[in-house]
Image (cartoon, helix red, strand yellow):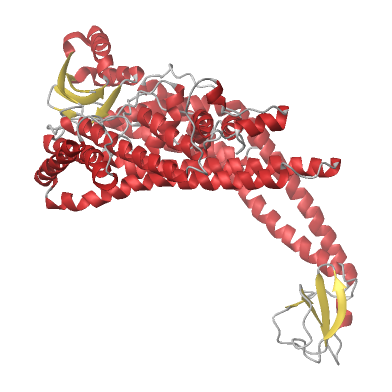
Amino acid sequence: MLKLALIYHKSISVDLVSEIQKLNSLEIVSPRALPLVISWDQKSSESIVMYELKLKDLINKLKSIVSTSKLFNPRINRESVRGVDELLHHCNQIVVLEKKLQSIFQRIDDLKKELEELESKEKKLEYLCSFGINPEHLKTPYYRIHLYASQDRLMPEQKPPELYYLGKHRCSHIYVSLQPVSLNIEEVDFEGYKTLSELETVLALTKQELKNKSEELSLLIEKADTIYTETNEELSQLLYELTVWRMRFDVLSGMGKTQTLNVLEAWIAEKDYEKISRYLASIFGKNLVILIEGDSEHLEDAPTVLQNKEQIVKPFEYIVRLMSLPSANELDPSTIFLFTLSFTYGMIVGDVGYGIVSFFIADFLQKKYRNSPMAYNIAGFWKVGAVATVLFGLIFDEYFAIHFKDLVKLLFNIDVNTTLLGLLGINLYLNRITQLPLLLGYTVIIGSIYMALGFLLGFINEFSHSKKHALAKLAWFMIIVAGYLVIPNFFFGSSFINLFAKEVELYLGISLFLASAIILVYAEGVAGIFEIPGLAGNVFSFMRIGAVGIAGVILAEIINEAFLHSNRDMFMYLVSTLLFIVLHTLNIILAMVEGTIQGARLNVVEFSTKFFRGSGREFRPFGYPAFSESSDST
């Protein structure tokens, strides 16, 4: 990335900003402070903002009452942006339309409130009429009958002796009493109605009023539908152009200015600099001078551009974005995660059958949730991880937790005494159940390799930023190398590297460790020494690869034992087959989730912290706004 200073005559301010917006290649930043002189019509700027807000509110209100079936995406001509004066002239129609719609909006709001009240009244009247009682019979000069309704029937100990149960009416239990009862139940109130016929008359009038107001509301909504259909495309285009000009004025208001010159600072991708600078020079000539102020390696505020064009890397770029964007002058971990995250995931799941099925599950999820970034990218990761799962499944000789020779025997009744890789002449085999200690040993070695790779990448990241920090990363890397020289000799009496005699490797390792410790104290202080046991913890964390993988294998073997060799009665055979498929599918999904969680933890918490700083900000070039019918804002 390059940081540019554009110095130009104030007469071309608006035209220059318009061209930059069309190019969509420069990110505008606030320039250093200079004396401010307003060089454009401030009143026009304020009018643009006012009309944009007013039109946005008008469109949103119109959309809120229009029938869903009438909504449509307007066609926006993104290249057609009128001048300020012409645009403001057309904005007069906003005021006219606003006045026309205001009465419609108000009447619709009033009708909705009235309908809500009438519906409540209708419901209550229907309930009262359903008793078939003349209200006047409930009250005489000598007594008054009180009716009570309760959703739940009262328990004997809750019911006072003066309260009598009549039975269930609709969804309520009805009680009667000759005197008021102080219980938390609702009294049926006839609200002063004298006769049943009076109740029924009021109910009929209420229904008619409801019908009339509903018809009036429908007519108003139809009218709004017509207005929306006729004006939506024009209003949306107008809103788009207002938004474009508001963005331009935002840039103009932040420029540094002198009496005759303006200064604009911007970031641009280095690959675009020559083309863009030539283009702008051809338009504005001597009225514009472009200077390079610096690049992303020497300026801290540079934005980040992730340039991963390969589709296979995109899911891992999404994971990086969830963590934090890398700063402009550090490595993008997306491609690194493509290999390291897929490796740990594949080693955890590690089954040929599971890998093939999980690939199709992931492919289905990608197609179903194409519009959900999280679901789409996680499914994309699972597709890549499925390939690694198949490869490790071949090494572990697992096909739905069945060994190759047993699978061939089961399907074809043929005796084979080797693995599929063995048939191909490749001598790679590790049984995760019977060779668990060896598997855990391998995971520790893999963990140390991950840590060493992380520190090497950290050295590369820090070298141009801070030599002292880079030296610390190199010291950590050398501590791991020292561990390879010392630990096998000291604890197991054997050499891991076999380059020198055992004693030479041991003393060389100890010397390398002491030298690394001294460098670490210089680079990170004494506290760095106390973090060495933490490095061992990071390495041993990779043993979870073996532990989680073994849990999945055991579950799969239990499923096989229970349903693979069941009774050959046709009914039981069908039931067993169905359960075999369902339970293995559930175990596959569980393995996919566990592989993702545990693999992500190892890569994000243990591995990436050794080299990844993050805290970058994305490059956002100044261009035309993204605009659609569903957007509430731009």
* Position of residue 65 in the picture relative to residue 443 (left or right): right
How many marks do you count on the picture? 0
Query: Which of 601/156 is in front?
Result: 601
Q: Is residue 313 above or below residue 192?
A: above
Residue 423 horizontal side relative to residue 466, left or right: right
Does any portion of residue 247 appear in the rendered image?
yes
Between 467 and 171, the residue placed more toward the observer is 467
- In the rendered image, residue 630, in percent from the top left (x then y), is placed at 53, 34
Q: Quadrant of residue 501?
A: top left
Foreground residue among 168 and 219: 168
Q: Position of residue 320 (x, y in %)?
A: 37, 35
Q: Is residue 125 above or below residue 19?
A: below
* Left or right side of 275 for 208: right
Along the line of sight, which residue is nearer the eye, 81 or 463?
Answer: 463
- In the rendered image, residue 36, in percent from the top left (x then y), is placed at 15, 32
Q: Where the C terminus falls, by quadrant? A: top left
* Residue 364 appearing in the image: no
- Residue 395 pos. (x, y %): 50, 31
For the N terminus, which image quadrant?
top left
Q: Is residue 399 above or below residue 295?
A: below
Outermost residue toward the top? 282
Picture residue at 53% right of the left edge, 25% below the top: 421
